[in-house]
Amino acid sequence: MAQATPTQPQALPTGRPANLRLPTPGCYADPHRSGLTAADVFDGMTEHLFYTLGKLAPTASRHDLYMALSYAVRDRLMTRYLAGLEALRKTPTRVVAYLSAEFLIGPQLGNNLLMLGIQEAAAEALKGFGIQDLGEILDVEEEPGLGNGGLGRLAACFLESLASLEIPATGYGIRYEFGIFDQLIRDGWQVEITDKWLKGGWPWELPQPDQACFVGFGGRTETYRDERDVLRSRWIPEEHAIGVPHDVPVLGYRVNTCDRLRLWRADATESFDFYAFNIGDYYGAVEEKVGSETLSKVLYPNDGTDEGRRLRLKQQHFFVSCSLQDMIRSLDARGIPVQEFPEHWAVQLNDTHPSIAVAELMRLLLDEKLLDWEDAWAITTASLAYTNHTLLPEALEKWGVDLFGALLPRHLEIIFEINRRFLQQVRVRHPGDEGVLRRVSIIDEEGARAVRMAHLATIGSHHVNGVAALHSDLVRRDLFSDFAALWPEKFTNVTNGVTPRRWLALANPRLSRLISDTIGDGWVKDLEQLRQLEAHADDASFLERWGETKLAVKTQLSHYIRNHTGVAVDPASLFDVQVKRIHEYKRQHLSALQVIAHYLRIKSGAGDDLPPRTVIFGGKAAPGYYMAKLIIRFINGIADTVNADPDMDGRLRVIFLPDYSVKLGEKVYPAADLSEQISTAGKEASGTGNMKFAMNGALTIGTLDGANVEIREQVGADNFFLFGLTTEEIAALRAEGYRPWERIGSIPELGEVLRLIEQGHFSEGDGDLFRPLLQNLTGQDPYFVLADFQDYQRAQQDVNQAWSDRRRWNRMAVLNTARTGFFSSDRSIREYAERIWGAQPYPVTISCEME
């Protein structure tokens, strides 16, 4: 085993020698720390083990080696990272600022090795430390707890694509100390434990305490006249917090562009009160520190309580205020007047969480930069754009006026003025129409008065986009129809995408090698090149290799399942997968009902023609969402019964994978045969898991919802298992009076499934455990589960028939992969850049000239 060989330290000169020349920014100032060979990586690891971690190689643990390799890789990012910042300082251009409450960036080491093209070099370097498999070290990395689901993962894909397309960008978010939660399954129930993802240190961040920002809360406002005798307002906050930025380099694929993710950590303005301590108030002495730092402790505090809602609003204002202050400060540092803000920053609001940016940017321009209202409003609306991600009313945030005013009094004043001016415009267009005024007002006057944040974002942005063609149509037609009538040019669509680097090249190296051996590796940068695979879709030899590759990947997941759940599954069985956030509209319980029907067919002897199937679930439920947690318990109850039944051996297995994450997703997506995308039509904005599955050759069974519509258009109707009511059919059924209990009598198999649940067959005889779920389905069925059950069963039979002809199935899988080029996040970012941001690529050159 190799180890570090320390050299004797050299005495440092007391003054700068006359012949010493400093390298220009962007120079590989130390080739030893920037080389990309195995020897360079080995030397970098050795150096960091010794000097950074204080370890010798013979005693280094796997965590030590992970940290050393990560630091060595980070060294190789720094030249690109600093060169990009310096280039923008010298030649300012428009930078994209992506504001998001979540950035589910996933493990960084493997991704950065791929971006640099040094996976093989790193693997070879590790052999010098006695590690024969790079995967051993990659598995050590804790996943950053910076997001929860598709919203955060989309933000991460977009940042990677921005860098890969060489578009300057900064992602702005919160450095959550504990993330959302780690999920355990105990007695079938979800149990939440603290996600201590930072406990072992995180080598990918660069703290920048000198660039901290102050953020205020509460207090009061007062008016005064400035030196020009203009009446102005000032905010006198009651409390403050300090936002300390931590930068994470985001490297593009095989380019010099290295953008950044800037995450804000909350600190107290005064960490310790010596007076309180000295008089015996030991808890009070650190009260402010604890209160302030709570802002960046955990993602999405429970908003079921007043304190939870208050904390959540404070979090949103905290990171938005820090981010906007940071943007303005960057202009000041370069001598650029704030009036040019829109020429230098294109600010994208990722859903409603950062929509307070409309009021905060106005406050900064009015109160700090002393602009007049018209100029401030012109800058704000020219800078901000808003992405809507949901049609669900509960996700379109509203804040009570009392809470909002107590926490952000100046912002409430500004919002009232924005609303007053906006409603005046509406009155001109719709004289005497009080109905439209009520519908579009930022202030909801029905019941307790509340601030509608989606309305604020829509009014204050120059573009509003949905994230799939169907979703964007519903946004224009239903959700924001009055706004779309006022500003039709403001509304557009940008269908989501996912990065092929992480979700195919990194997550599925076996399939990636097969593809590259067949059509070359240009697809990694240009996913449309996958179309060349269509020419091989009828090649028997290629289809055989495709099937062998899939089986090898499924075998890997089978080992993981056995090690983490104790259940043995057959990798040759049909892997039927549904992994995503647990929510009623995503209808995991529809899949569960189908599993019971499948189980009953086998038990009754009517399932002899059913192919072996392994049904895999995974996902987290929000801690306060009882029905979603009951669905998890329901799935685990079914799994316990099915997996313990000898009649199911070799026929059916049900698995719930605990603590679903990006890291686990990298194992699951490549192994799936069937992708369950079965949300109620009109409820899913887009989905991105559906894209990852299709990209890896899984066939989709799904409704015409979200991006499923476009996936089916791209891959072909013959390669997609469609079922379910459409958005229009659901609206009609709801209008005529949907009576779910009537479905039970007309579908005998459904009645048998529900009776088995009611009898406690999947809850050890406890007939009450799942009663709330049954009552919800048979009484209201808000997501039309029973309405779609029979057609879902029909589509599953189509799946069984297709799977029985393995060559046909593999051909369909190849065509799914071949036709997913449209779903690259590179395409999404190009559309944003051209149609919304007006942002251009800005290639970074690396110069080694000396000055």
Image: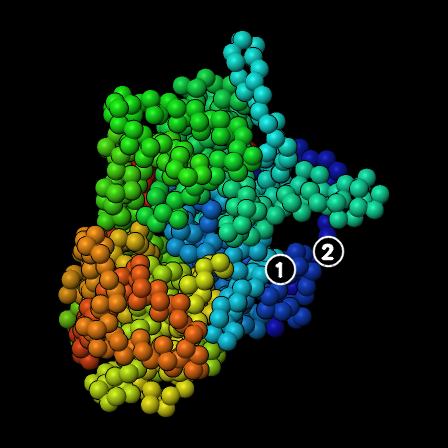
Neighbours of disc 2 within 10 Å: few (<14), some (14-19), many (20+) = few
Q: Position of residue 157 (x, y in %)?
A: 39, 51
Q: Position of residue 530 (x, y in %)?
A: 24, 59
Residue 325 showing in the rendered view: no
Q: Quadrant of the C terminus?
A: top right
Q: Depth-wise, is mark 1 or mark 2 nearer the camera?
A: 1
Give the total number of marks visible in the rendering: 2
Q: Position of residue 27 (x, y in %)?
A: 51, 42
Between residue 419 and residue 547, name the one nearer to us.
Answer: 419
Residue 527 showing in the rendered view: yes
Residue type at the position of mark 1: Lys
Q: Residue at x 26, y 30 (%)?
A: 486
Q: CA distance from mark 1 to mark 2?
A: 34 Å
Neighbours of disc 1 within 10 Å: few (<14), some (14-19), many (20+) = few
Q: Residue at x 19, y 54 (%)?
A: 736
**Residue wearing tag 2:** 8
Q: Would residue 644 be found to the left or right of residue 602 on screen?
A: right
In the rendered view, would you say 116 is above or below 242?
below
Between residue 623 and residue 364, name the one nearer to us.
Answer: 623
Between residue 840 and residue 207, name the one nearer to us.
Answer: 207
Residue type at the position of mark 2: Gln
Q: Would residue 414 be found to the left or right of residue 2 on screen?
A: left
Between residue 726 and residue 75, name the one nearer to us.
Answer: 726
**Residue wearing tag 1:** 199
Task: Find residue 604 and report its image quarter.
Answer: bottom left
In the rendered view, would you say 654 is above or below 378?
below
Q: Would residue 16 be found to the left or right of residue 784 on screen?
A: right
Question: Residue 756 got which mark?
Answer: none
Is disc 1 placed on a helix, strand or loop?
loop
Q: Position of residue 321 (x, y in %)?
A: 52, 35
Q: Earlier in the sequence, mark 1 or mark 2?
A: 2
Task: Find residue 786 and report its image quarter.
Answer: bottom left
